[in-house]
Image: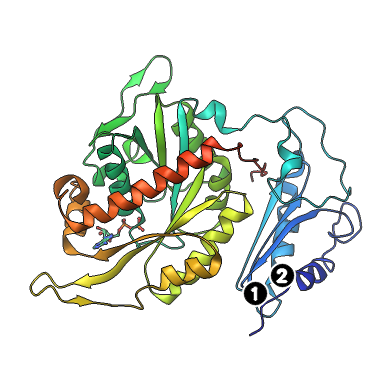
Amino acid sequence: MASVTKEQVLAALADVADPDSGQNVIAAGLVSGVVVRDGNVGFALEVDPDDGAAKEPLRKACEVAVERLPGVLSVTAVLTAERPSGGPARPQGQAHGHTPGGQAGAAGQAQPGAQLLPGVKSVIAIASGKGGVGKSTTAVNIATAMASQNVRVGLLDCDIYGPSIPRMLNLSGQPEVVGERTLRPMANYGIKCMSIGFLVAEDTAMIWRGPMVMQALEQMMRDVEWGELDVLLCDLPPGTGDAQLTMAQRVPLTGAVIVSTPQDIALLDVTRGINMFQQVNVPIFGVVENMSYYVCPECGHRAELFHHGGARETAQRLGVDFLGEIPLDMAIRTTSDSGHPIVVTQPESPHAAAYRRIASGLIDKASAAVGGAGRAQPRIVMM
Ligand code: ADP
């Protein structure tokens, strides 16, 4: 099927009426930053921050209009507000053509993350298009690999729906409160860690509403004594829904890593993941292929269970880096699930070496990114 074009997307959006202005959303100048890539479409709707919740039906209507186009695989529309805190809002209906997070919104504006994580040099998201691909296992092993290279590293478990990092780092109990309302991160294997899992039981079903998610996240950044860190890794919840998109924007990310298994279906999710970060102007550091192949522990035979190398091909096609591959191996599972990551317990293993290579690549990318000009930050209106 032919890929959808930007012109088709704009034409579809021109059929969506903005009830406030009485014009269509294009004529009203609400749409910016249209990105079309291999059937994945993203764009921003610029609104007054105070109108955020009221504009949600319009955002949805825009997504639906574009979803109907043939050749569209995914649509991500975000609400953005260009107004700096306390400053005047951009008049509605004014035409503009920058991408979300582009220069216009960021001029003279402090990075929102600056106050949240003052001593942290770089923040890297570990994300995945769907659950169960080994995202947390990868995050923990990359963190321990970084620590083994004398990098001051923290791990923020943003997976509020299924926080598994405490178990994987063999951490339990509750963080100490220091001062008025600051929590001291828990620590093991040289990694400082904070997780909602320390505050609620792992098997407690939590119903999180949007604002609660953001509040919890902000507290885990701002009200935690992270101290000086070279890298803070953020294990995001799996998927590319609204919660992830909001987090990708609200956490002051230096870059993002997407973890995927080689199955084709997961690779579609990779595209969605990449698209999501591009929407909020977060650089993609690259893709890791997990459970890439299987080495028989008995005879050493290497078997490709799925179409091995798919993530590398997808990365190449989408113009992002391939960071490395990790095999499907019982030892990775047992060490990770028991809280003794393989990088720590079997540092001589080829798997530990593979994690260290990925970690080194990320450290280089993070240093290069923070050494350069600061990233422009979009502002997204929270529901
Ligand atoms: P996610 O964070 O993507 O939901 P997890 O990291 O929790 O996934 O991993 C899901 C399960 O897969 C865990 O039991 C974990 O130990 C296992 N696992 C992850 N990566 C590997 C691997 N490379 N080889 C074997 N098992 C793995």
Name the residue at 75% across, 39% down.
50
Query: Which quadrant: the N terminus?
Result: bottom right
Name the residue at 64% across, 43% down.
382
Q: Quadrant of residue 313?
A: bottom left
- Residue bearing mark 2: 66
Name the residue at 58% across, 60% down.
275
- The reply to whether residue 81 is visible in this rendering is no
Residue furthest top as drawn: 179
Which percent across, then down, holds residue 354?
Answer: 27, 56
Q: Vertical placement of 110 versus 46: above or below?
A: above
Q: Amino acid at mark 1?
A: Val
Q: Quadrant of residue 31?
A: bottom right
Q: Which mark is residue 72?
A: 1
Q: Quadrant of residue 180?
A: top left
Q: Vertical placement of 300 versus 27: above or below?
A: below
The answer to the question of whether label 2 and label 1 lie on touching residues, with beta carbons closer than 8 A, is yes
- Report the side of 278 relative to 307 (left or right): right
Looking at the picture, tell me which residue is in the foreground, 335 or 63: 335
- Report the side of 290 relative to 312 (left or right): left
Q: Is mark 1 within 8 Å of ligand 1?
A: no
